[in-house]
Amino acid sequence: MAQDNKATDRRRARVRRTLRARAYGKPRLSVFRSSKQIYCQIIDDEAGLTLAAASSLEKSARESLKTGADVEAARAIGKLIAERATAAGVTDVVFDRGSYLYHGRVKALAEGAREGGLNF
């Protein structure tokens, strides 16, 4: 079990290091997924502020989604974060997948955010 956590931590650090090199002052779209929900937030690392956030736990999302743990929910949350980001004046971000592979729900969230108008 400790080996799995080491690999996850290394992957997360590698992704974050690459993002810092390519960010050029852009905020990052950070993703966290659990077995039942998905969360994302747009973070300005220079100022240390969260500019926008969305999750499948929000009341509006829970009413319209069957569950928070599928690809459709991730795509809807991606569109929601894009809508909130444009309202906050953010259009260009860097996608931070964390230690997750770009597949399934993480990919669906990214595609939903792109459909909503975010550029990355």
Image: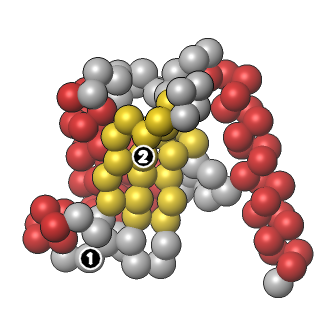
Return the residue at label 1.
67
Residue shown at 19% from the left, 63% from the top: 61
Residue in the foreground of this view, choosing between 108 and 13 = 13
Q: Is residue 59 above or below residue 20?
A: below
Q: Which quadrant of the view contains residue 85?
A: top left
Q: Is residue 3 above or below residue 117?
A: below
Q: Is residue 117 visible?
A: no
Residue shown at 51% from the left, 59% from the top: 32
Few, some or many residues within 10 Å of mark 1 (<14, 14–19, 20+): some
Q: Earlier in the sequence, mark 2 or mark 1?
A: 2
Which residue sits furthest bottom? 1
Q: Is residue 90 above or below residue 7?
A: above
Spot occupied by residue 86 in the image (x, y as percentages of width and height)? 25, 27
Residue 41's label in the rendered image is: 2
> Is 27 situated left or right of 67 in this image?
right
Residue shown at 24% from the left, 46% from the top: 80
Element at label 2: strand
Q: Nearer the viewer, mark 2 or mark 1?
A: 2
Q: CA distance from mark 2 to mark 1?
A: 20 Å
Element at label 1: loop
Spot occupied by residue 20 in the image (x, y as percentages of width and height)? 70, 28
Residue shown at 24% from the left, 37% from the top: 84
Few, some or many residues within 10 Å of mark 2 (<14, 14–19, 20+): many
